[in-house]
Image (cartoon, rainbow, N blue to C red):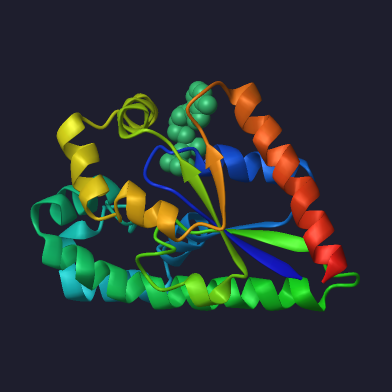
C-alpha cells in the first residue's frame, strides 16, 4: 500500500484535491480532521490544552473556544508551539493507527492519501512514500483563503509565516499539482495522478 503525503500552504487547494481523490475511491486520511477530533469534549488533549494554555479557552458549553485560541496563537507564537506539542504527536499516532487498519483490510487499497498541512515542517515525511504538493501562487492562496475563512490579509500572512516557503515545499515534492487555474483543470490533474499512482502501486 503506497502512502502519498499531500501538502500545500493555506488555501492552496488541499481539501479540494483530497475530495477529488476520495471521489475516485481513494481512502483519504486528513490530519486536520484528526486534530479536530482530538479537541472534542472529553478528549485528553483538550484537557491538556486548558491546563497549559488556560481554562478561559473553555466555552460555557464545555467546548474549545476556537476563535479565541486562534487569536491567542496569532498574538503569542510560543503558545502555538505549546499547542502543536500537544496535538501533533497525537494526530500522528491516530494517522498511523488508521494506516494500520487500511493495511490490514482485505484487499488493502493500492494507495492512500495522507493529507497533512505541515507535512514538511513537522517531520511526518518519514510516514509517506511520496510527497504530493499542491502549488498555488501566494496571491491566489490569500484570495481563496480569505474568501473561504473570512480571514484578513494579516491573519493569513501570520499563518503563511508558520509554513515553509513555496520553494522549500516544491523542493520536497515528488509530484506537483499546479492549482492556478479553474476547478476542472485541478480535477484533471488529480485524475492523471490517480492513474500514475495505481500503476506505480501495482508495479511495486
Ligand atoms: P486548503 O485545504 O489547502 O486550505 P481548499 O481546498 O479549502 O484549500 O481551497 C481553498 C478555497 O479555494 C476553497 O474555497 C476552494 O473551493 C477554493 N478553490 C480551490 N481551488 C480552486 C480553483 N482551482 N478554482 C477556484 N476555487 C478554488
Quadrant assignment, res 143? top left
Of 15 and 3, the residue lying toward us: 3
Q: Position of residue 31 (x, y in %)?
A: 50, 60
Quadrant assignment, res 11? top left
Q: Residue at x 75, y 55 (%)?
A: 197
Of 186 and 57, the residue lying toward us: 186
Q: How many numbered marks does the figure carry?
A: 0
Q: Position of residue 60 (x, y in %)?
A: 27, 53
Q: Give the left or right position of residue 62, taking residue 96 as reference.
A: left
Q: Position of residue 19 (x, y in %)?
A: 64, 41
**Location of the C terminus (image quadrant):** bottom right
Q: Is residue 54 visible?
A: no
Q: Residue at x 73, y 75 (%)?
A: 101
Q: Residue at x 14, y 54 (%)?
A: 72
Q: Is residue 12 above or below residue 34?
A: above
Of 159 and 196, the residue lying toward us: 196
Q: Is residue 137 visible?
A: yes
Q: Position of residue 63 (x, y in %)?
A: 34, 56
Of 62 and 154, the residue lying toward us: 154
Q: Give the left or right position of residue 38, taking residue 145 as reference.
A: right
Quadrant assignment, res 36? bottom left
Residue at the farthest right position: 107
Q: Residue at x 9, y 52 (%)?
A: 75
**Location of the N terminus (image quadrant):** bottom right
Amino acid at each position: 500500500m503506497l502512502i502519498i503525503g499531500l501538502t500545500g500552504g493555506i488555501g492552496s487547494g488541499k481539501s479540494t484535491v483530497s475530495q477529488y481523490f476520495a471521489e475516485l475511491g481513494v481512502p483519504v486520511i486528513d490530519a486536520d480532521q484528526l486534530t479536530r477530533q482530538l479537541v472534542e469534549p472529553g478528549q485528553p488533549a483538550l484537557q491538556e490544552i486548558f491546563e497549559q494554555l488556560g481554562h478561559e479557552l473553555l466555552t460555557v458549553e464545555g467546548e474549545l473556544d476556537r476563535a479565541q485560541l486562534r487569536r491567542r496563537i496569532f498574538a503569542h507564537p510560543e503558545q502555538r508551539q505549546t499547542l502543536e506539542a500537544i496535538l501533533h504527536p497525537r494526530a500522528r499516532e491516530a494517522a498511523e493507527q488508521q494506516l494500520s487498519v487500511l493495511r490490514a483490510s482485505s484487499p488493502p487499497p493500492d494507495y492512500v492519501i495522507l493529507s497533512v498541512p505541515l507535512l514538511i515542517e513537522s517531520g511526518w515525511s518519514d510516514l509517506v512514500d511520496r510527497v504530493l504538493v499542491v502549488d498555488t501562487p501566494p496571491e491566489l492562496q490569500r484570495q481563496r483563503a480569505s474568501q473561504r475563512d473570512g480571514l484578513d490579509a494579516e491573519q493569513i500572512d501570520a499563518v503563511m509565516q508558520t509554513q515553509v516557503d513555496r520553494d522549500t515545499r516544491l523542493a520536497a515534492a515528488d509530484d506537483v499539482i499546479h492549482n492556478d487555474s479553474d476547478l476542472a483543470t485541478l480535477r484533471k490533474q488529480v485524475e492523471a495522478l490517480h492513474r500514475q499512482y495505481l500503476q506505480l502501486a501495482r508495479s511495486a
